[in-house]
Structure formats: structure tokens, C-alpha cells
Image: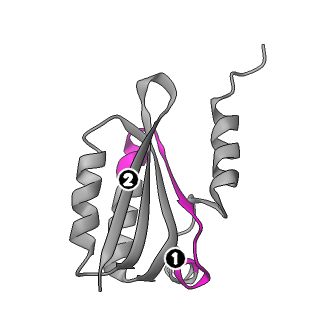
């Protein structure tokens, strides 16, 4: 099996950035090190928002879950947030079974994510 990872960055508040990782293929014990390596590169910068686009992920093993949850912990340590986008039902079920969805923000599509992010960046009313 294989995993293709696409990474894009957007500016965020206060000089921070948002990183979006699109995963296409399988995230298992064999491909998890590939994602770990990519995440190490992402965390070299000022990433405060981490978004996993799982719309094209066809399989997720416990090794893949571990990498995602470790990245989530790391971004939270930066006072940031981890979000998931376009979860397929079978992938969402994996997270539900191990009770790993608590505290994760889930979005059905890019538009819902963008609306949420835009609301976060609006200045508070005086």
C-alpha cells in the first residue's frame, strides 16, 4: 500500500501558520513513518493550526492513529488546534471505536472549515 501526502500552508494569526495535510491512500504501520517525517518538517515552522484532510484516505491502522494523535498533542502544546476534514465513515468509525474524537474538530468540507477559520480570525466587537 502507499500514501501520498500533500502539504499546504496558510498564514494564521500573530505570525503563525496553518498547515493542511491531504492524505491519499493508506495510513498504516508501513506508511506512518512517511507521515511522521512530513509532520516533523511542518513543526519546524510556526504551525499552530493543523488540518488533516482525510477525504482520500482509504485505510487507517493503529499506527496511523498514533501518528495523528501525537501530532495533535504537539500542536496543542503550542496552544493550537488540530482539525479533521472530510472523514470517510469507515475512518471516522476507527476513531470512534478508540474514543479518539473527543476534542477534535471535524468538518465535512473545505467550505465549512474556511467558515470556521474565518470566524476565529474576526476581531472581537468592542
Residue appearing at x 57%, y 58% in the figure = 103
- Whether 6 is drawn above or below 119: the answer is below
In this view, which residue lies farthest toward the right? 125
x and y, in percent, of residue 25 in the image: 39, 78
Residue 82 magenta: yes
x and y, in percent, of residue 3 in the image: 32, 74
Residue appearing at x 59%, y 67% in the figure = 86
**In which quadrant is the N terminus drawn?**
bottom left
Q: Which mark is residue 122?
A: none
* Residue span colored magenta: 74-92
| Left-right relation of 31 to 12 | left
Residue tagged 2: 7
What is the CA distance from the residue labelled 2 to the residue labelled 1? 22 Å
Residue tagged 1: 95
Q: Secondary structure at mark 2?
A: strand
| Left-right relation of 114 to 66 | right
- Whether 20 is drawn above or below 47: the answer is below
Residue 79 magenta: yes
Binning the other alpha carbons within 10 Å of mark 1 as few (below 14), some (14 to 19) or many (20 upward) gives: some
| Rendered image quadrant of residue 28 | bottom left
Residue appearing at x 39%, y 65% in the figure = 68
| Left-right relation of 13 to 17 | right
Dot in front, 2 or 1: 2
| First in sequence: mark 2 vs mark 1 | 2
**In which quadrant is the C terminus drawn?**
top right
Amino acid at each position: 500500500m502507499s500514501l501520498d501526502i500533500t502539504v499546504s500552508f496558510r498564514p494564521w494569526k500573530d505570525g503563525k501558520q496553518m498547515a493542511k495535510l491531504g492524505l491519499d491512500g493508506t495510513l498504516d504501520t508501513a506508511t506512518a513513518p512517511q507521515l511522521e517525517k512530513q509532520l516533523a518538517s511542518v513543526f519546524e515552522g510556526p504551525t499552530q493550526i493543523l488540518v488533516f484532510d482525510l477525504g482520500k484516505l482509504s485505510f487507517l491502522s493503529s499506527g496511523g492513529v498514533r501518528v495523528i494523535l501525537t501530532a495533535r498533542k504537539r500542536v496543542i502544546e503550542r496552544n493550537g488546534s488540530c482539525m479533521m476534514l472530510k472523514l470517510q465513515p469507515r475512518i471516522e468509525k476507527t476513531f470512534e471505536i478508540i474514543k479518539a474524537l473527543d476534542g477534535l474538530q471535524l468538518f465535512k468540507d473545505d467550505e465549512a472549515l474556511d467558515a470556521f477559520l474565518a470566524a476565529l480570525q474576526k476581531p472581537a466587537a468592542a
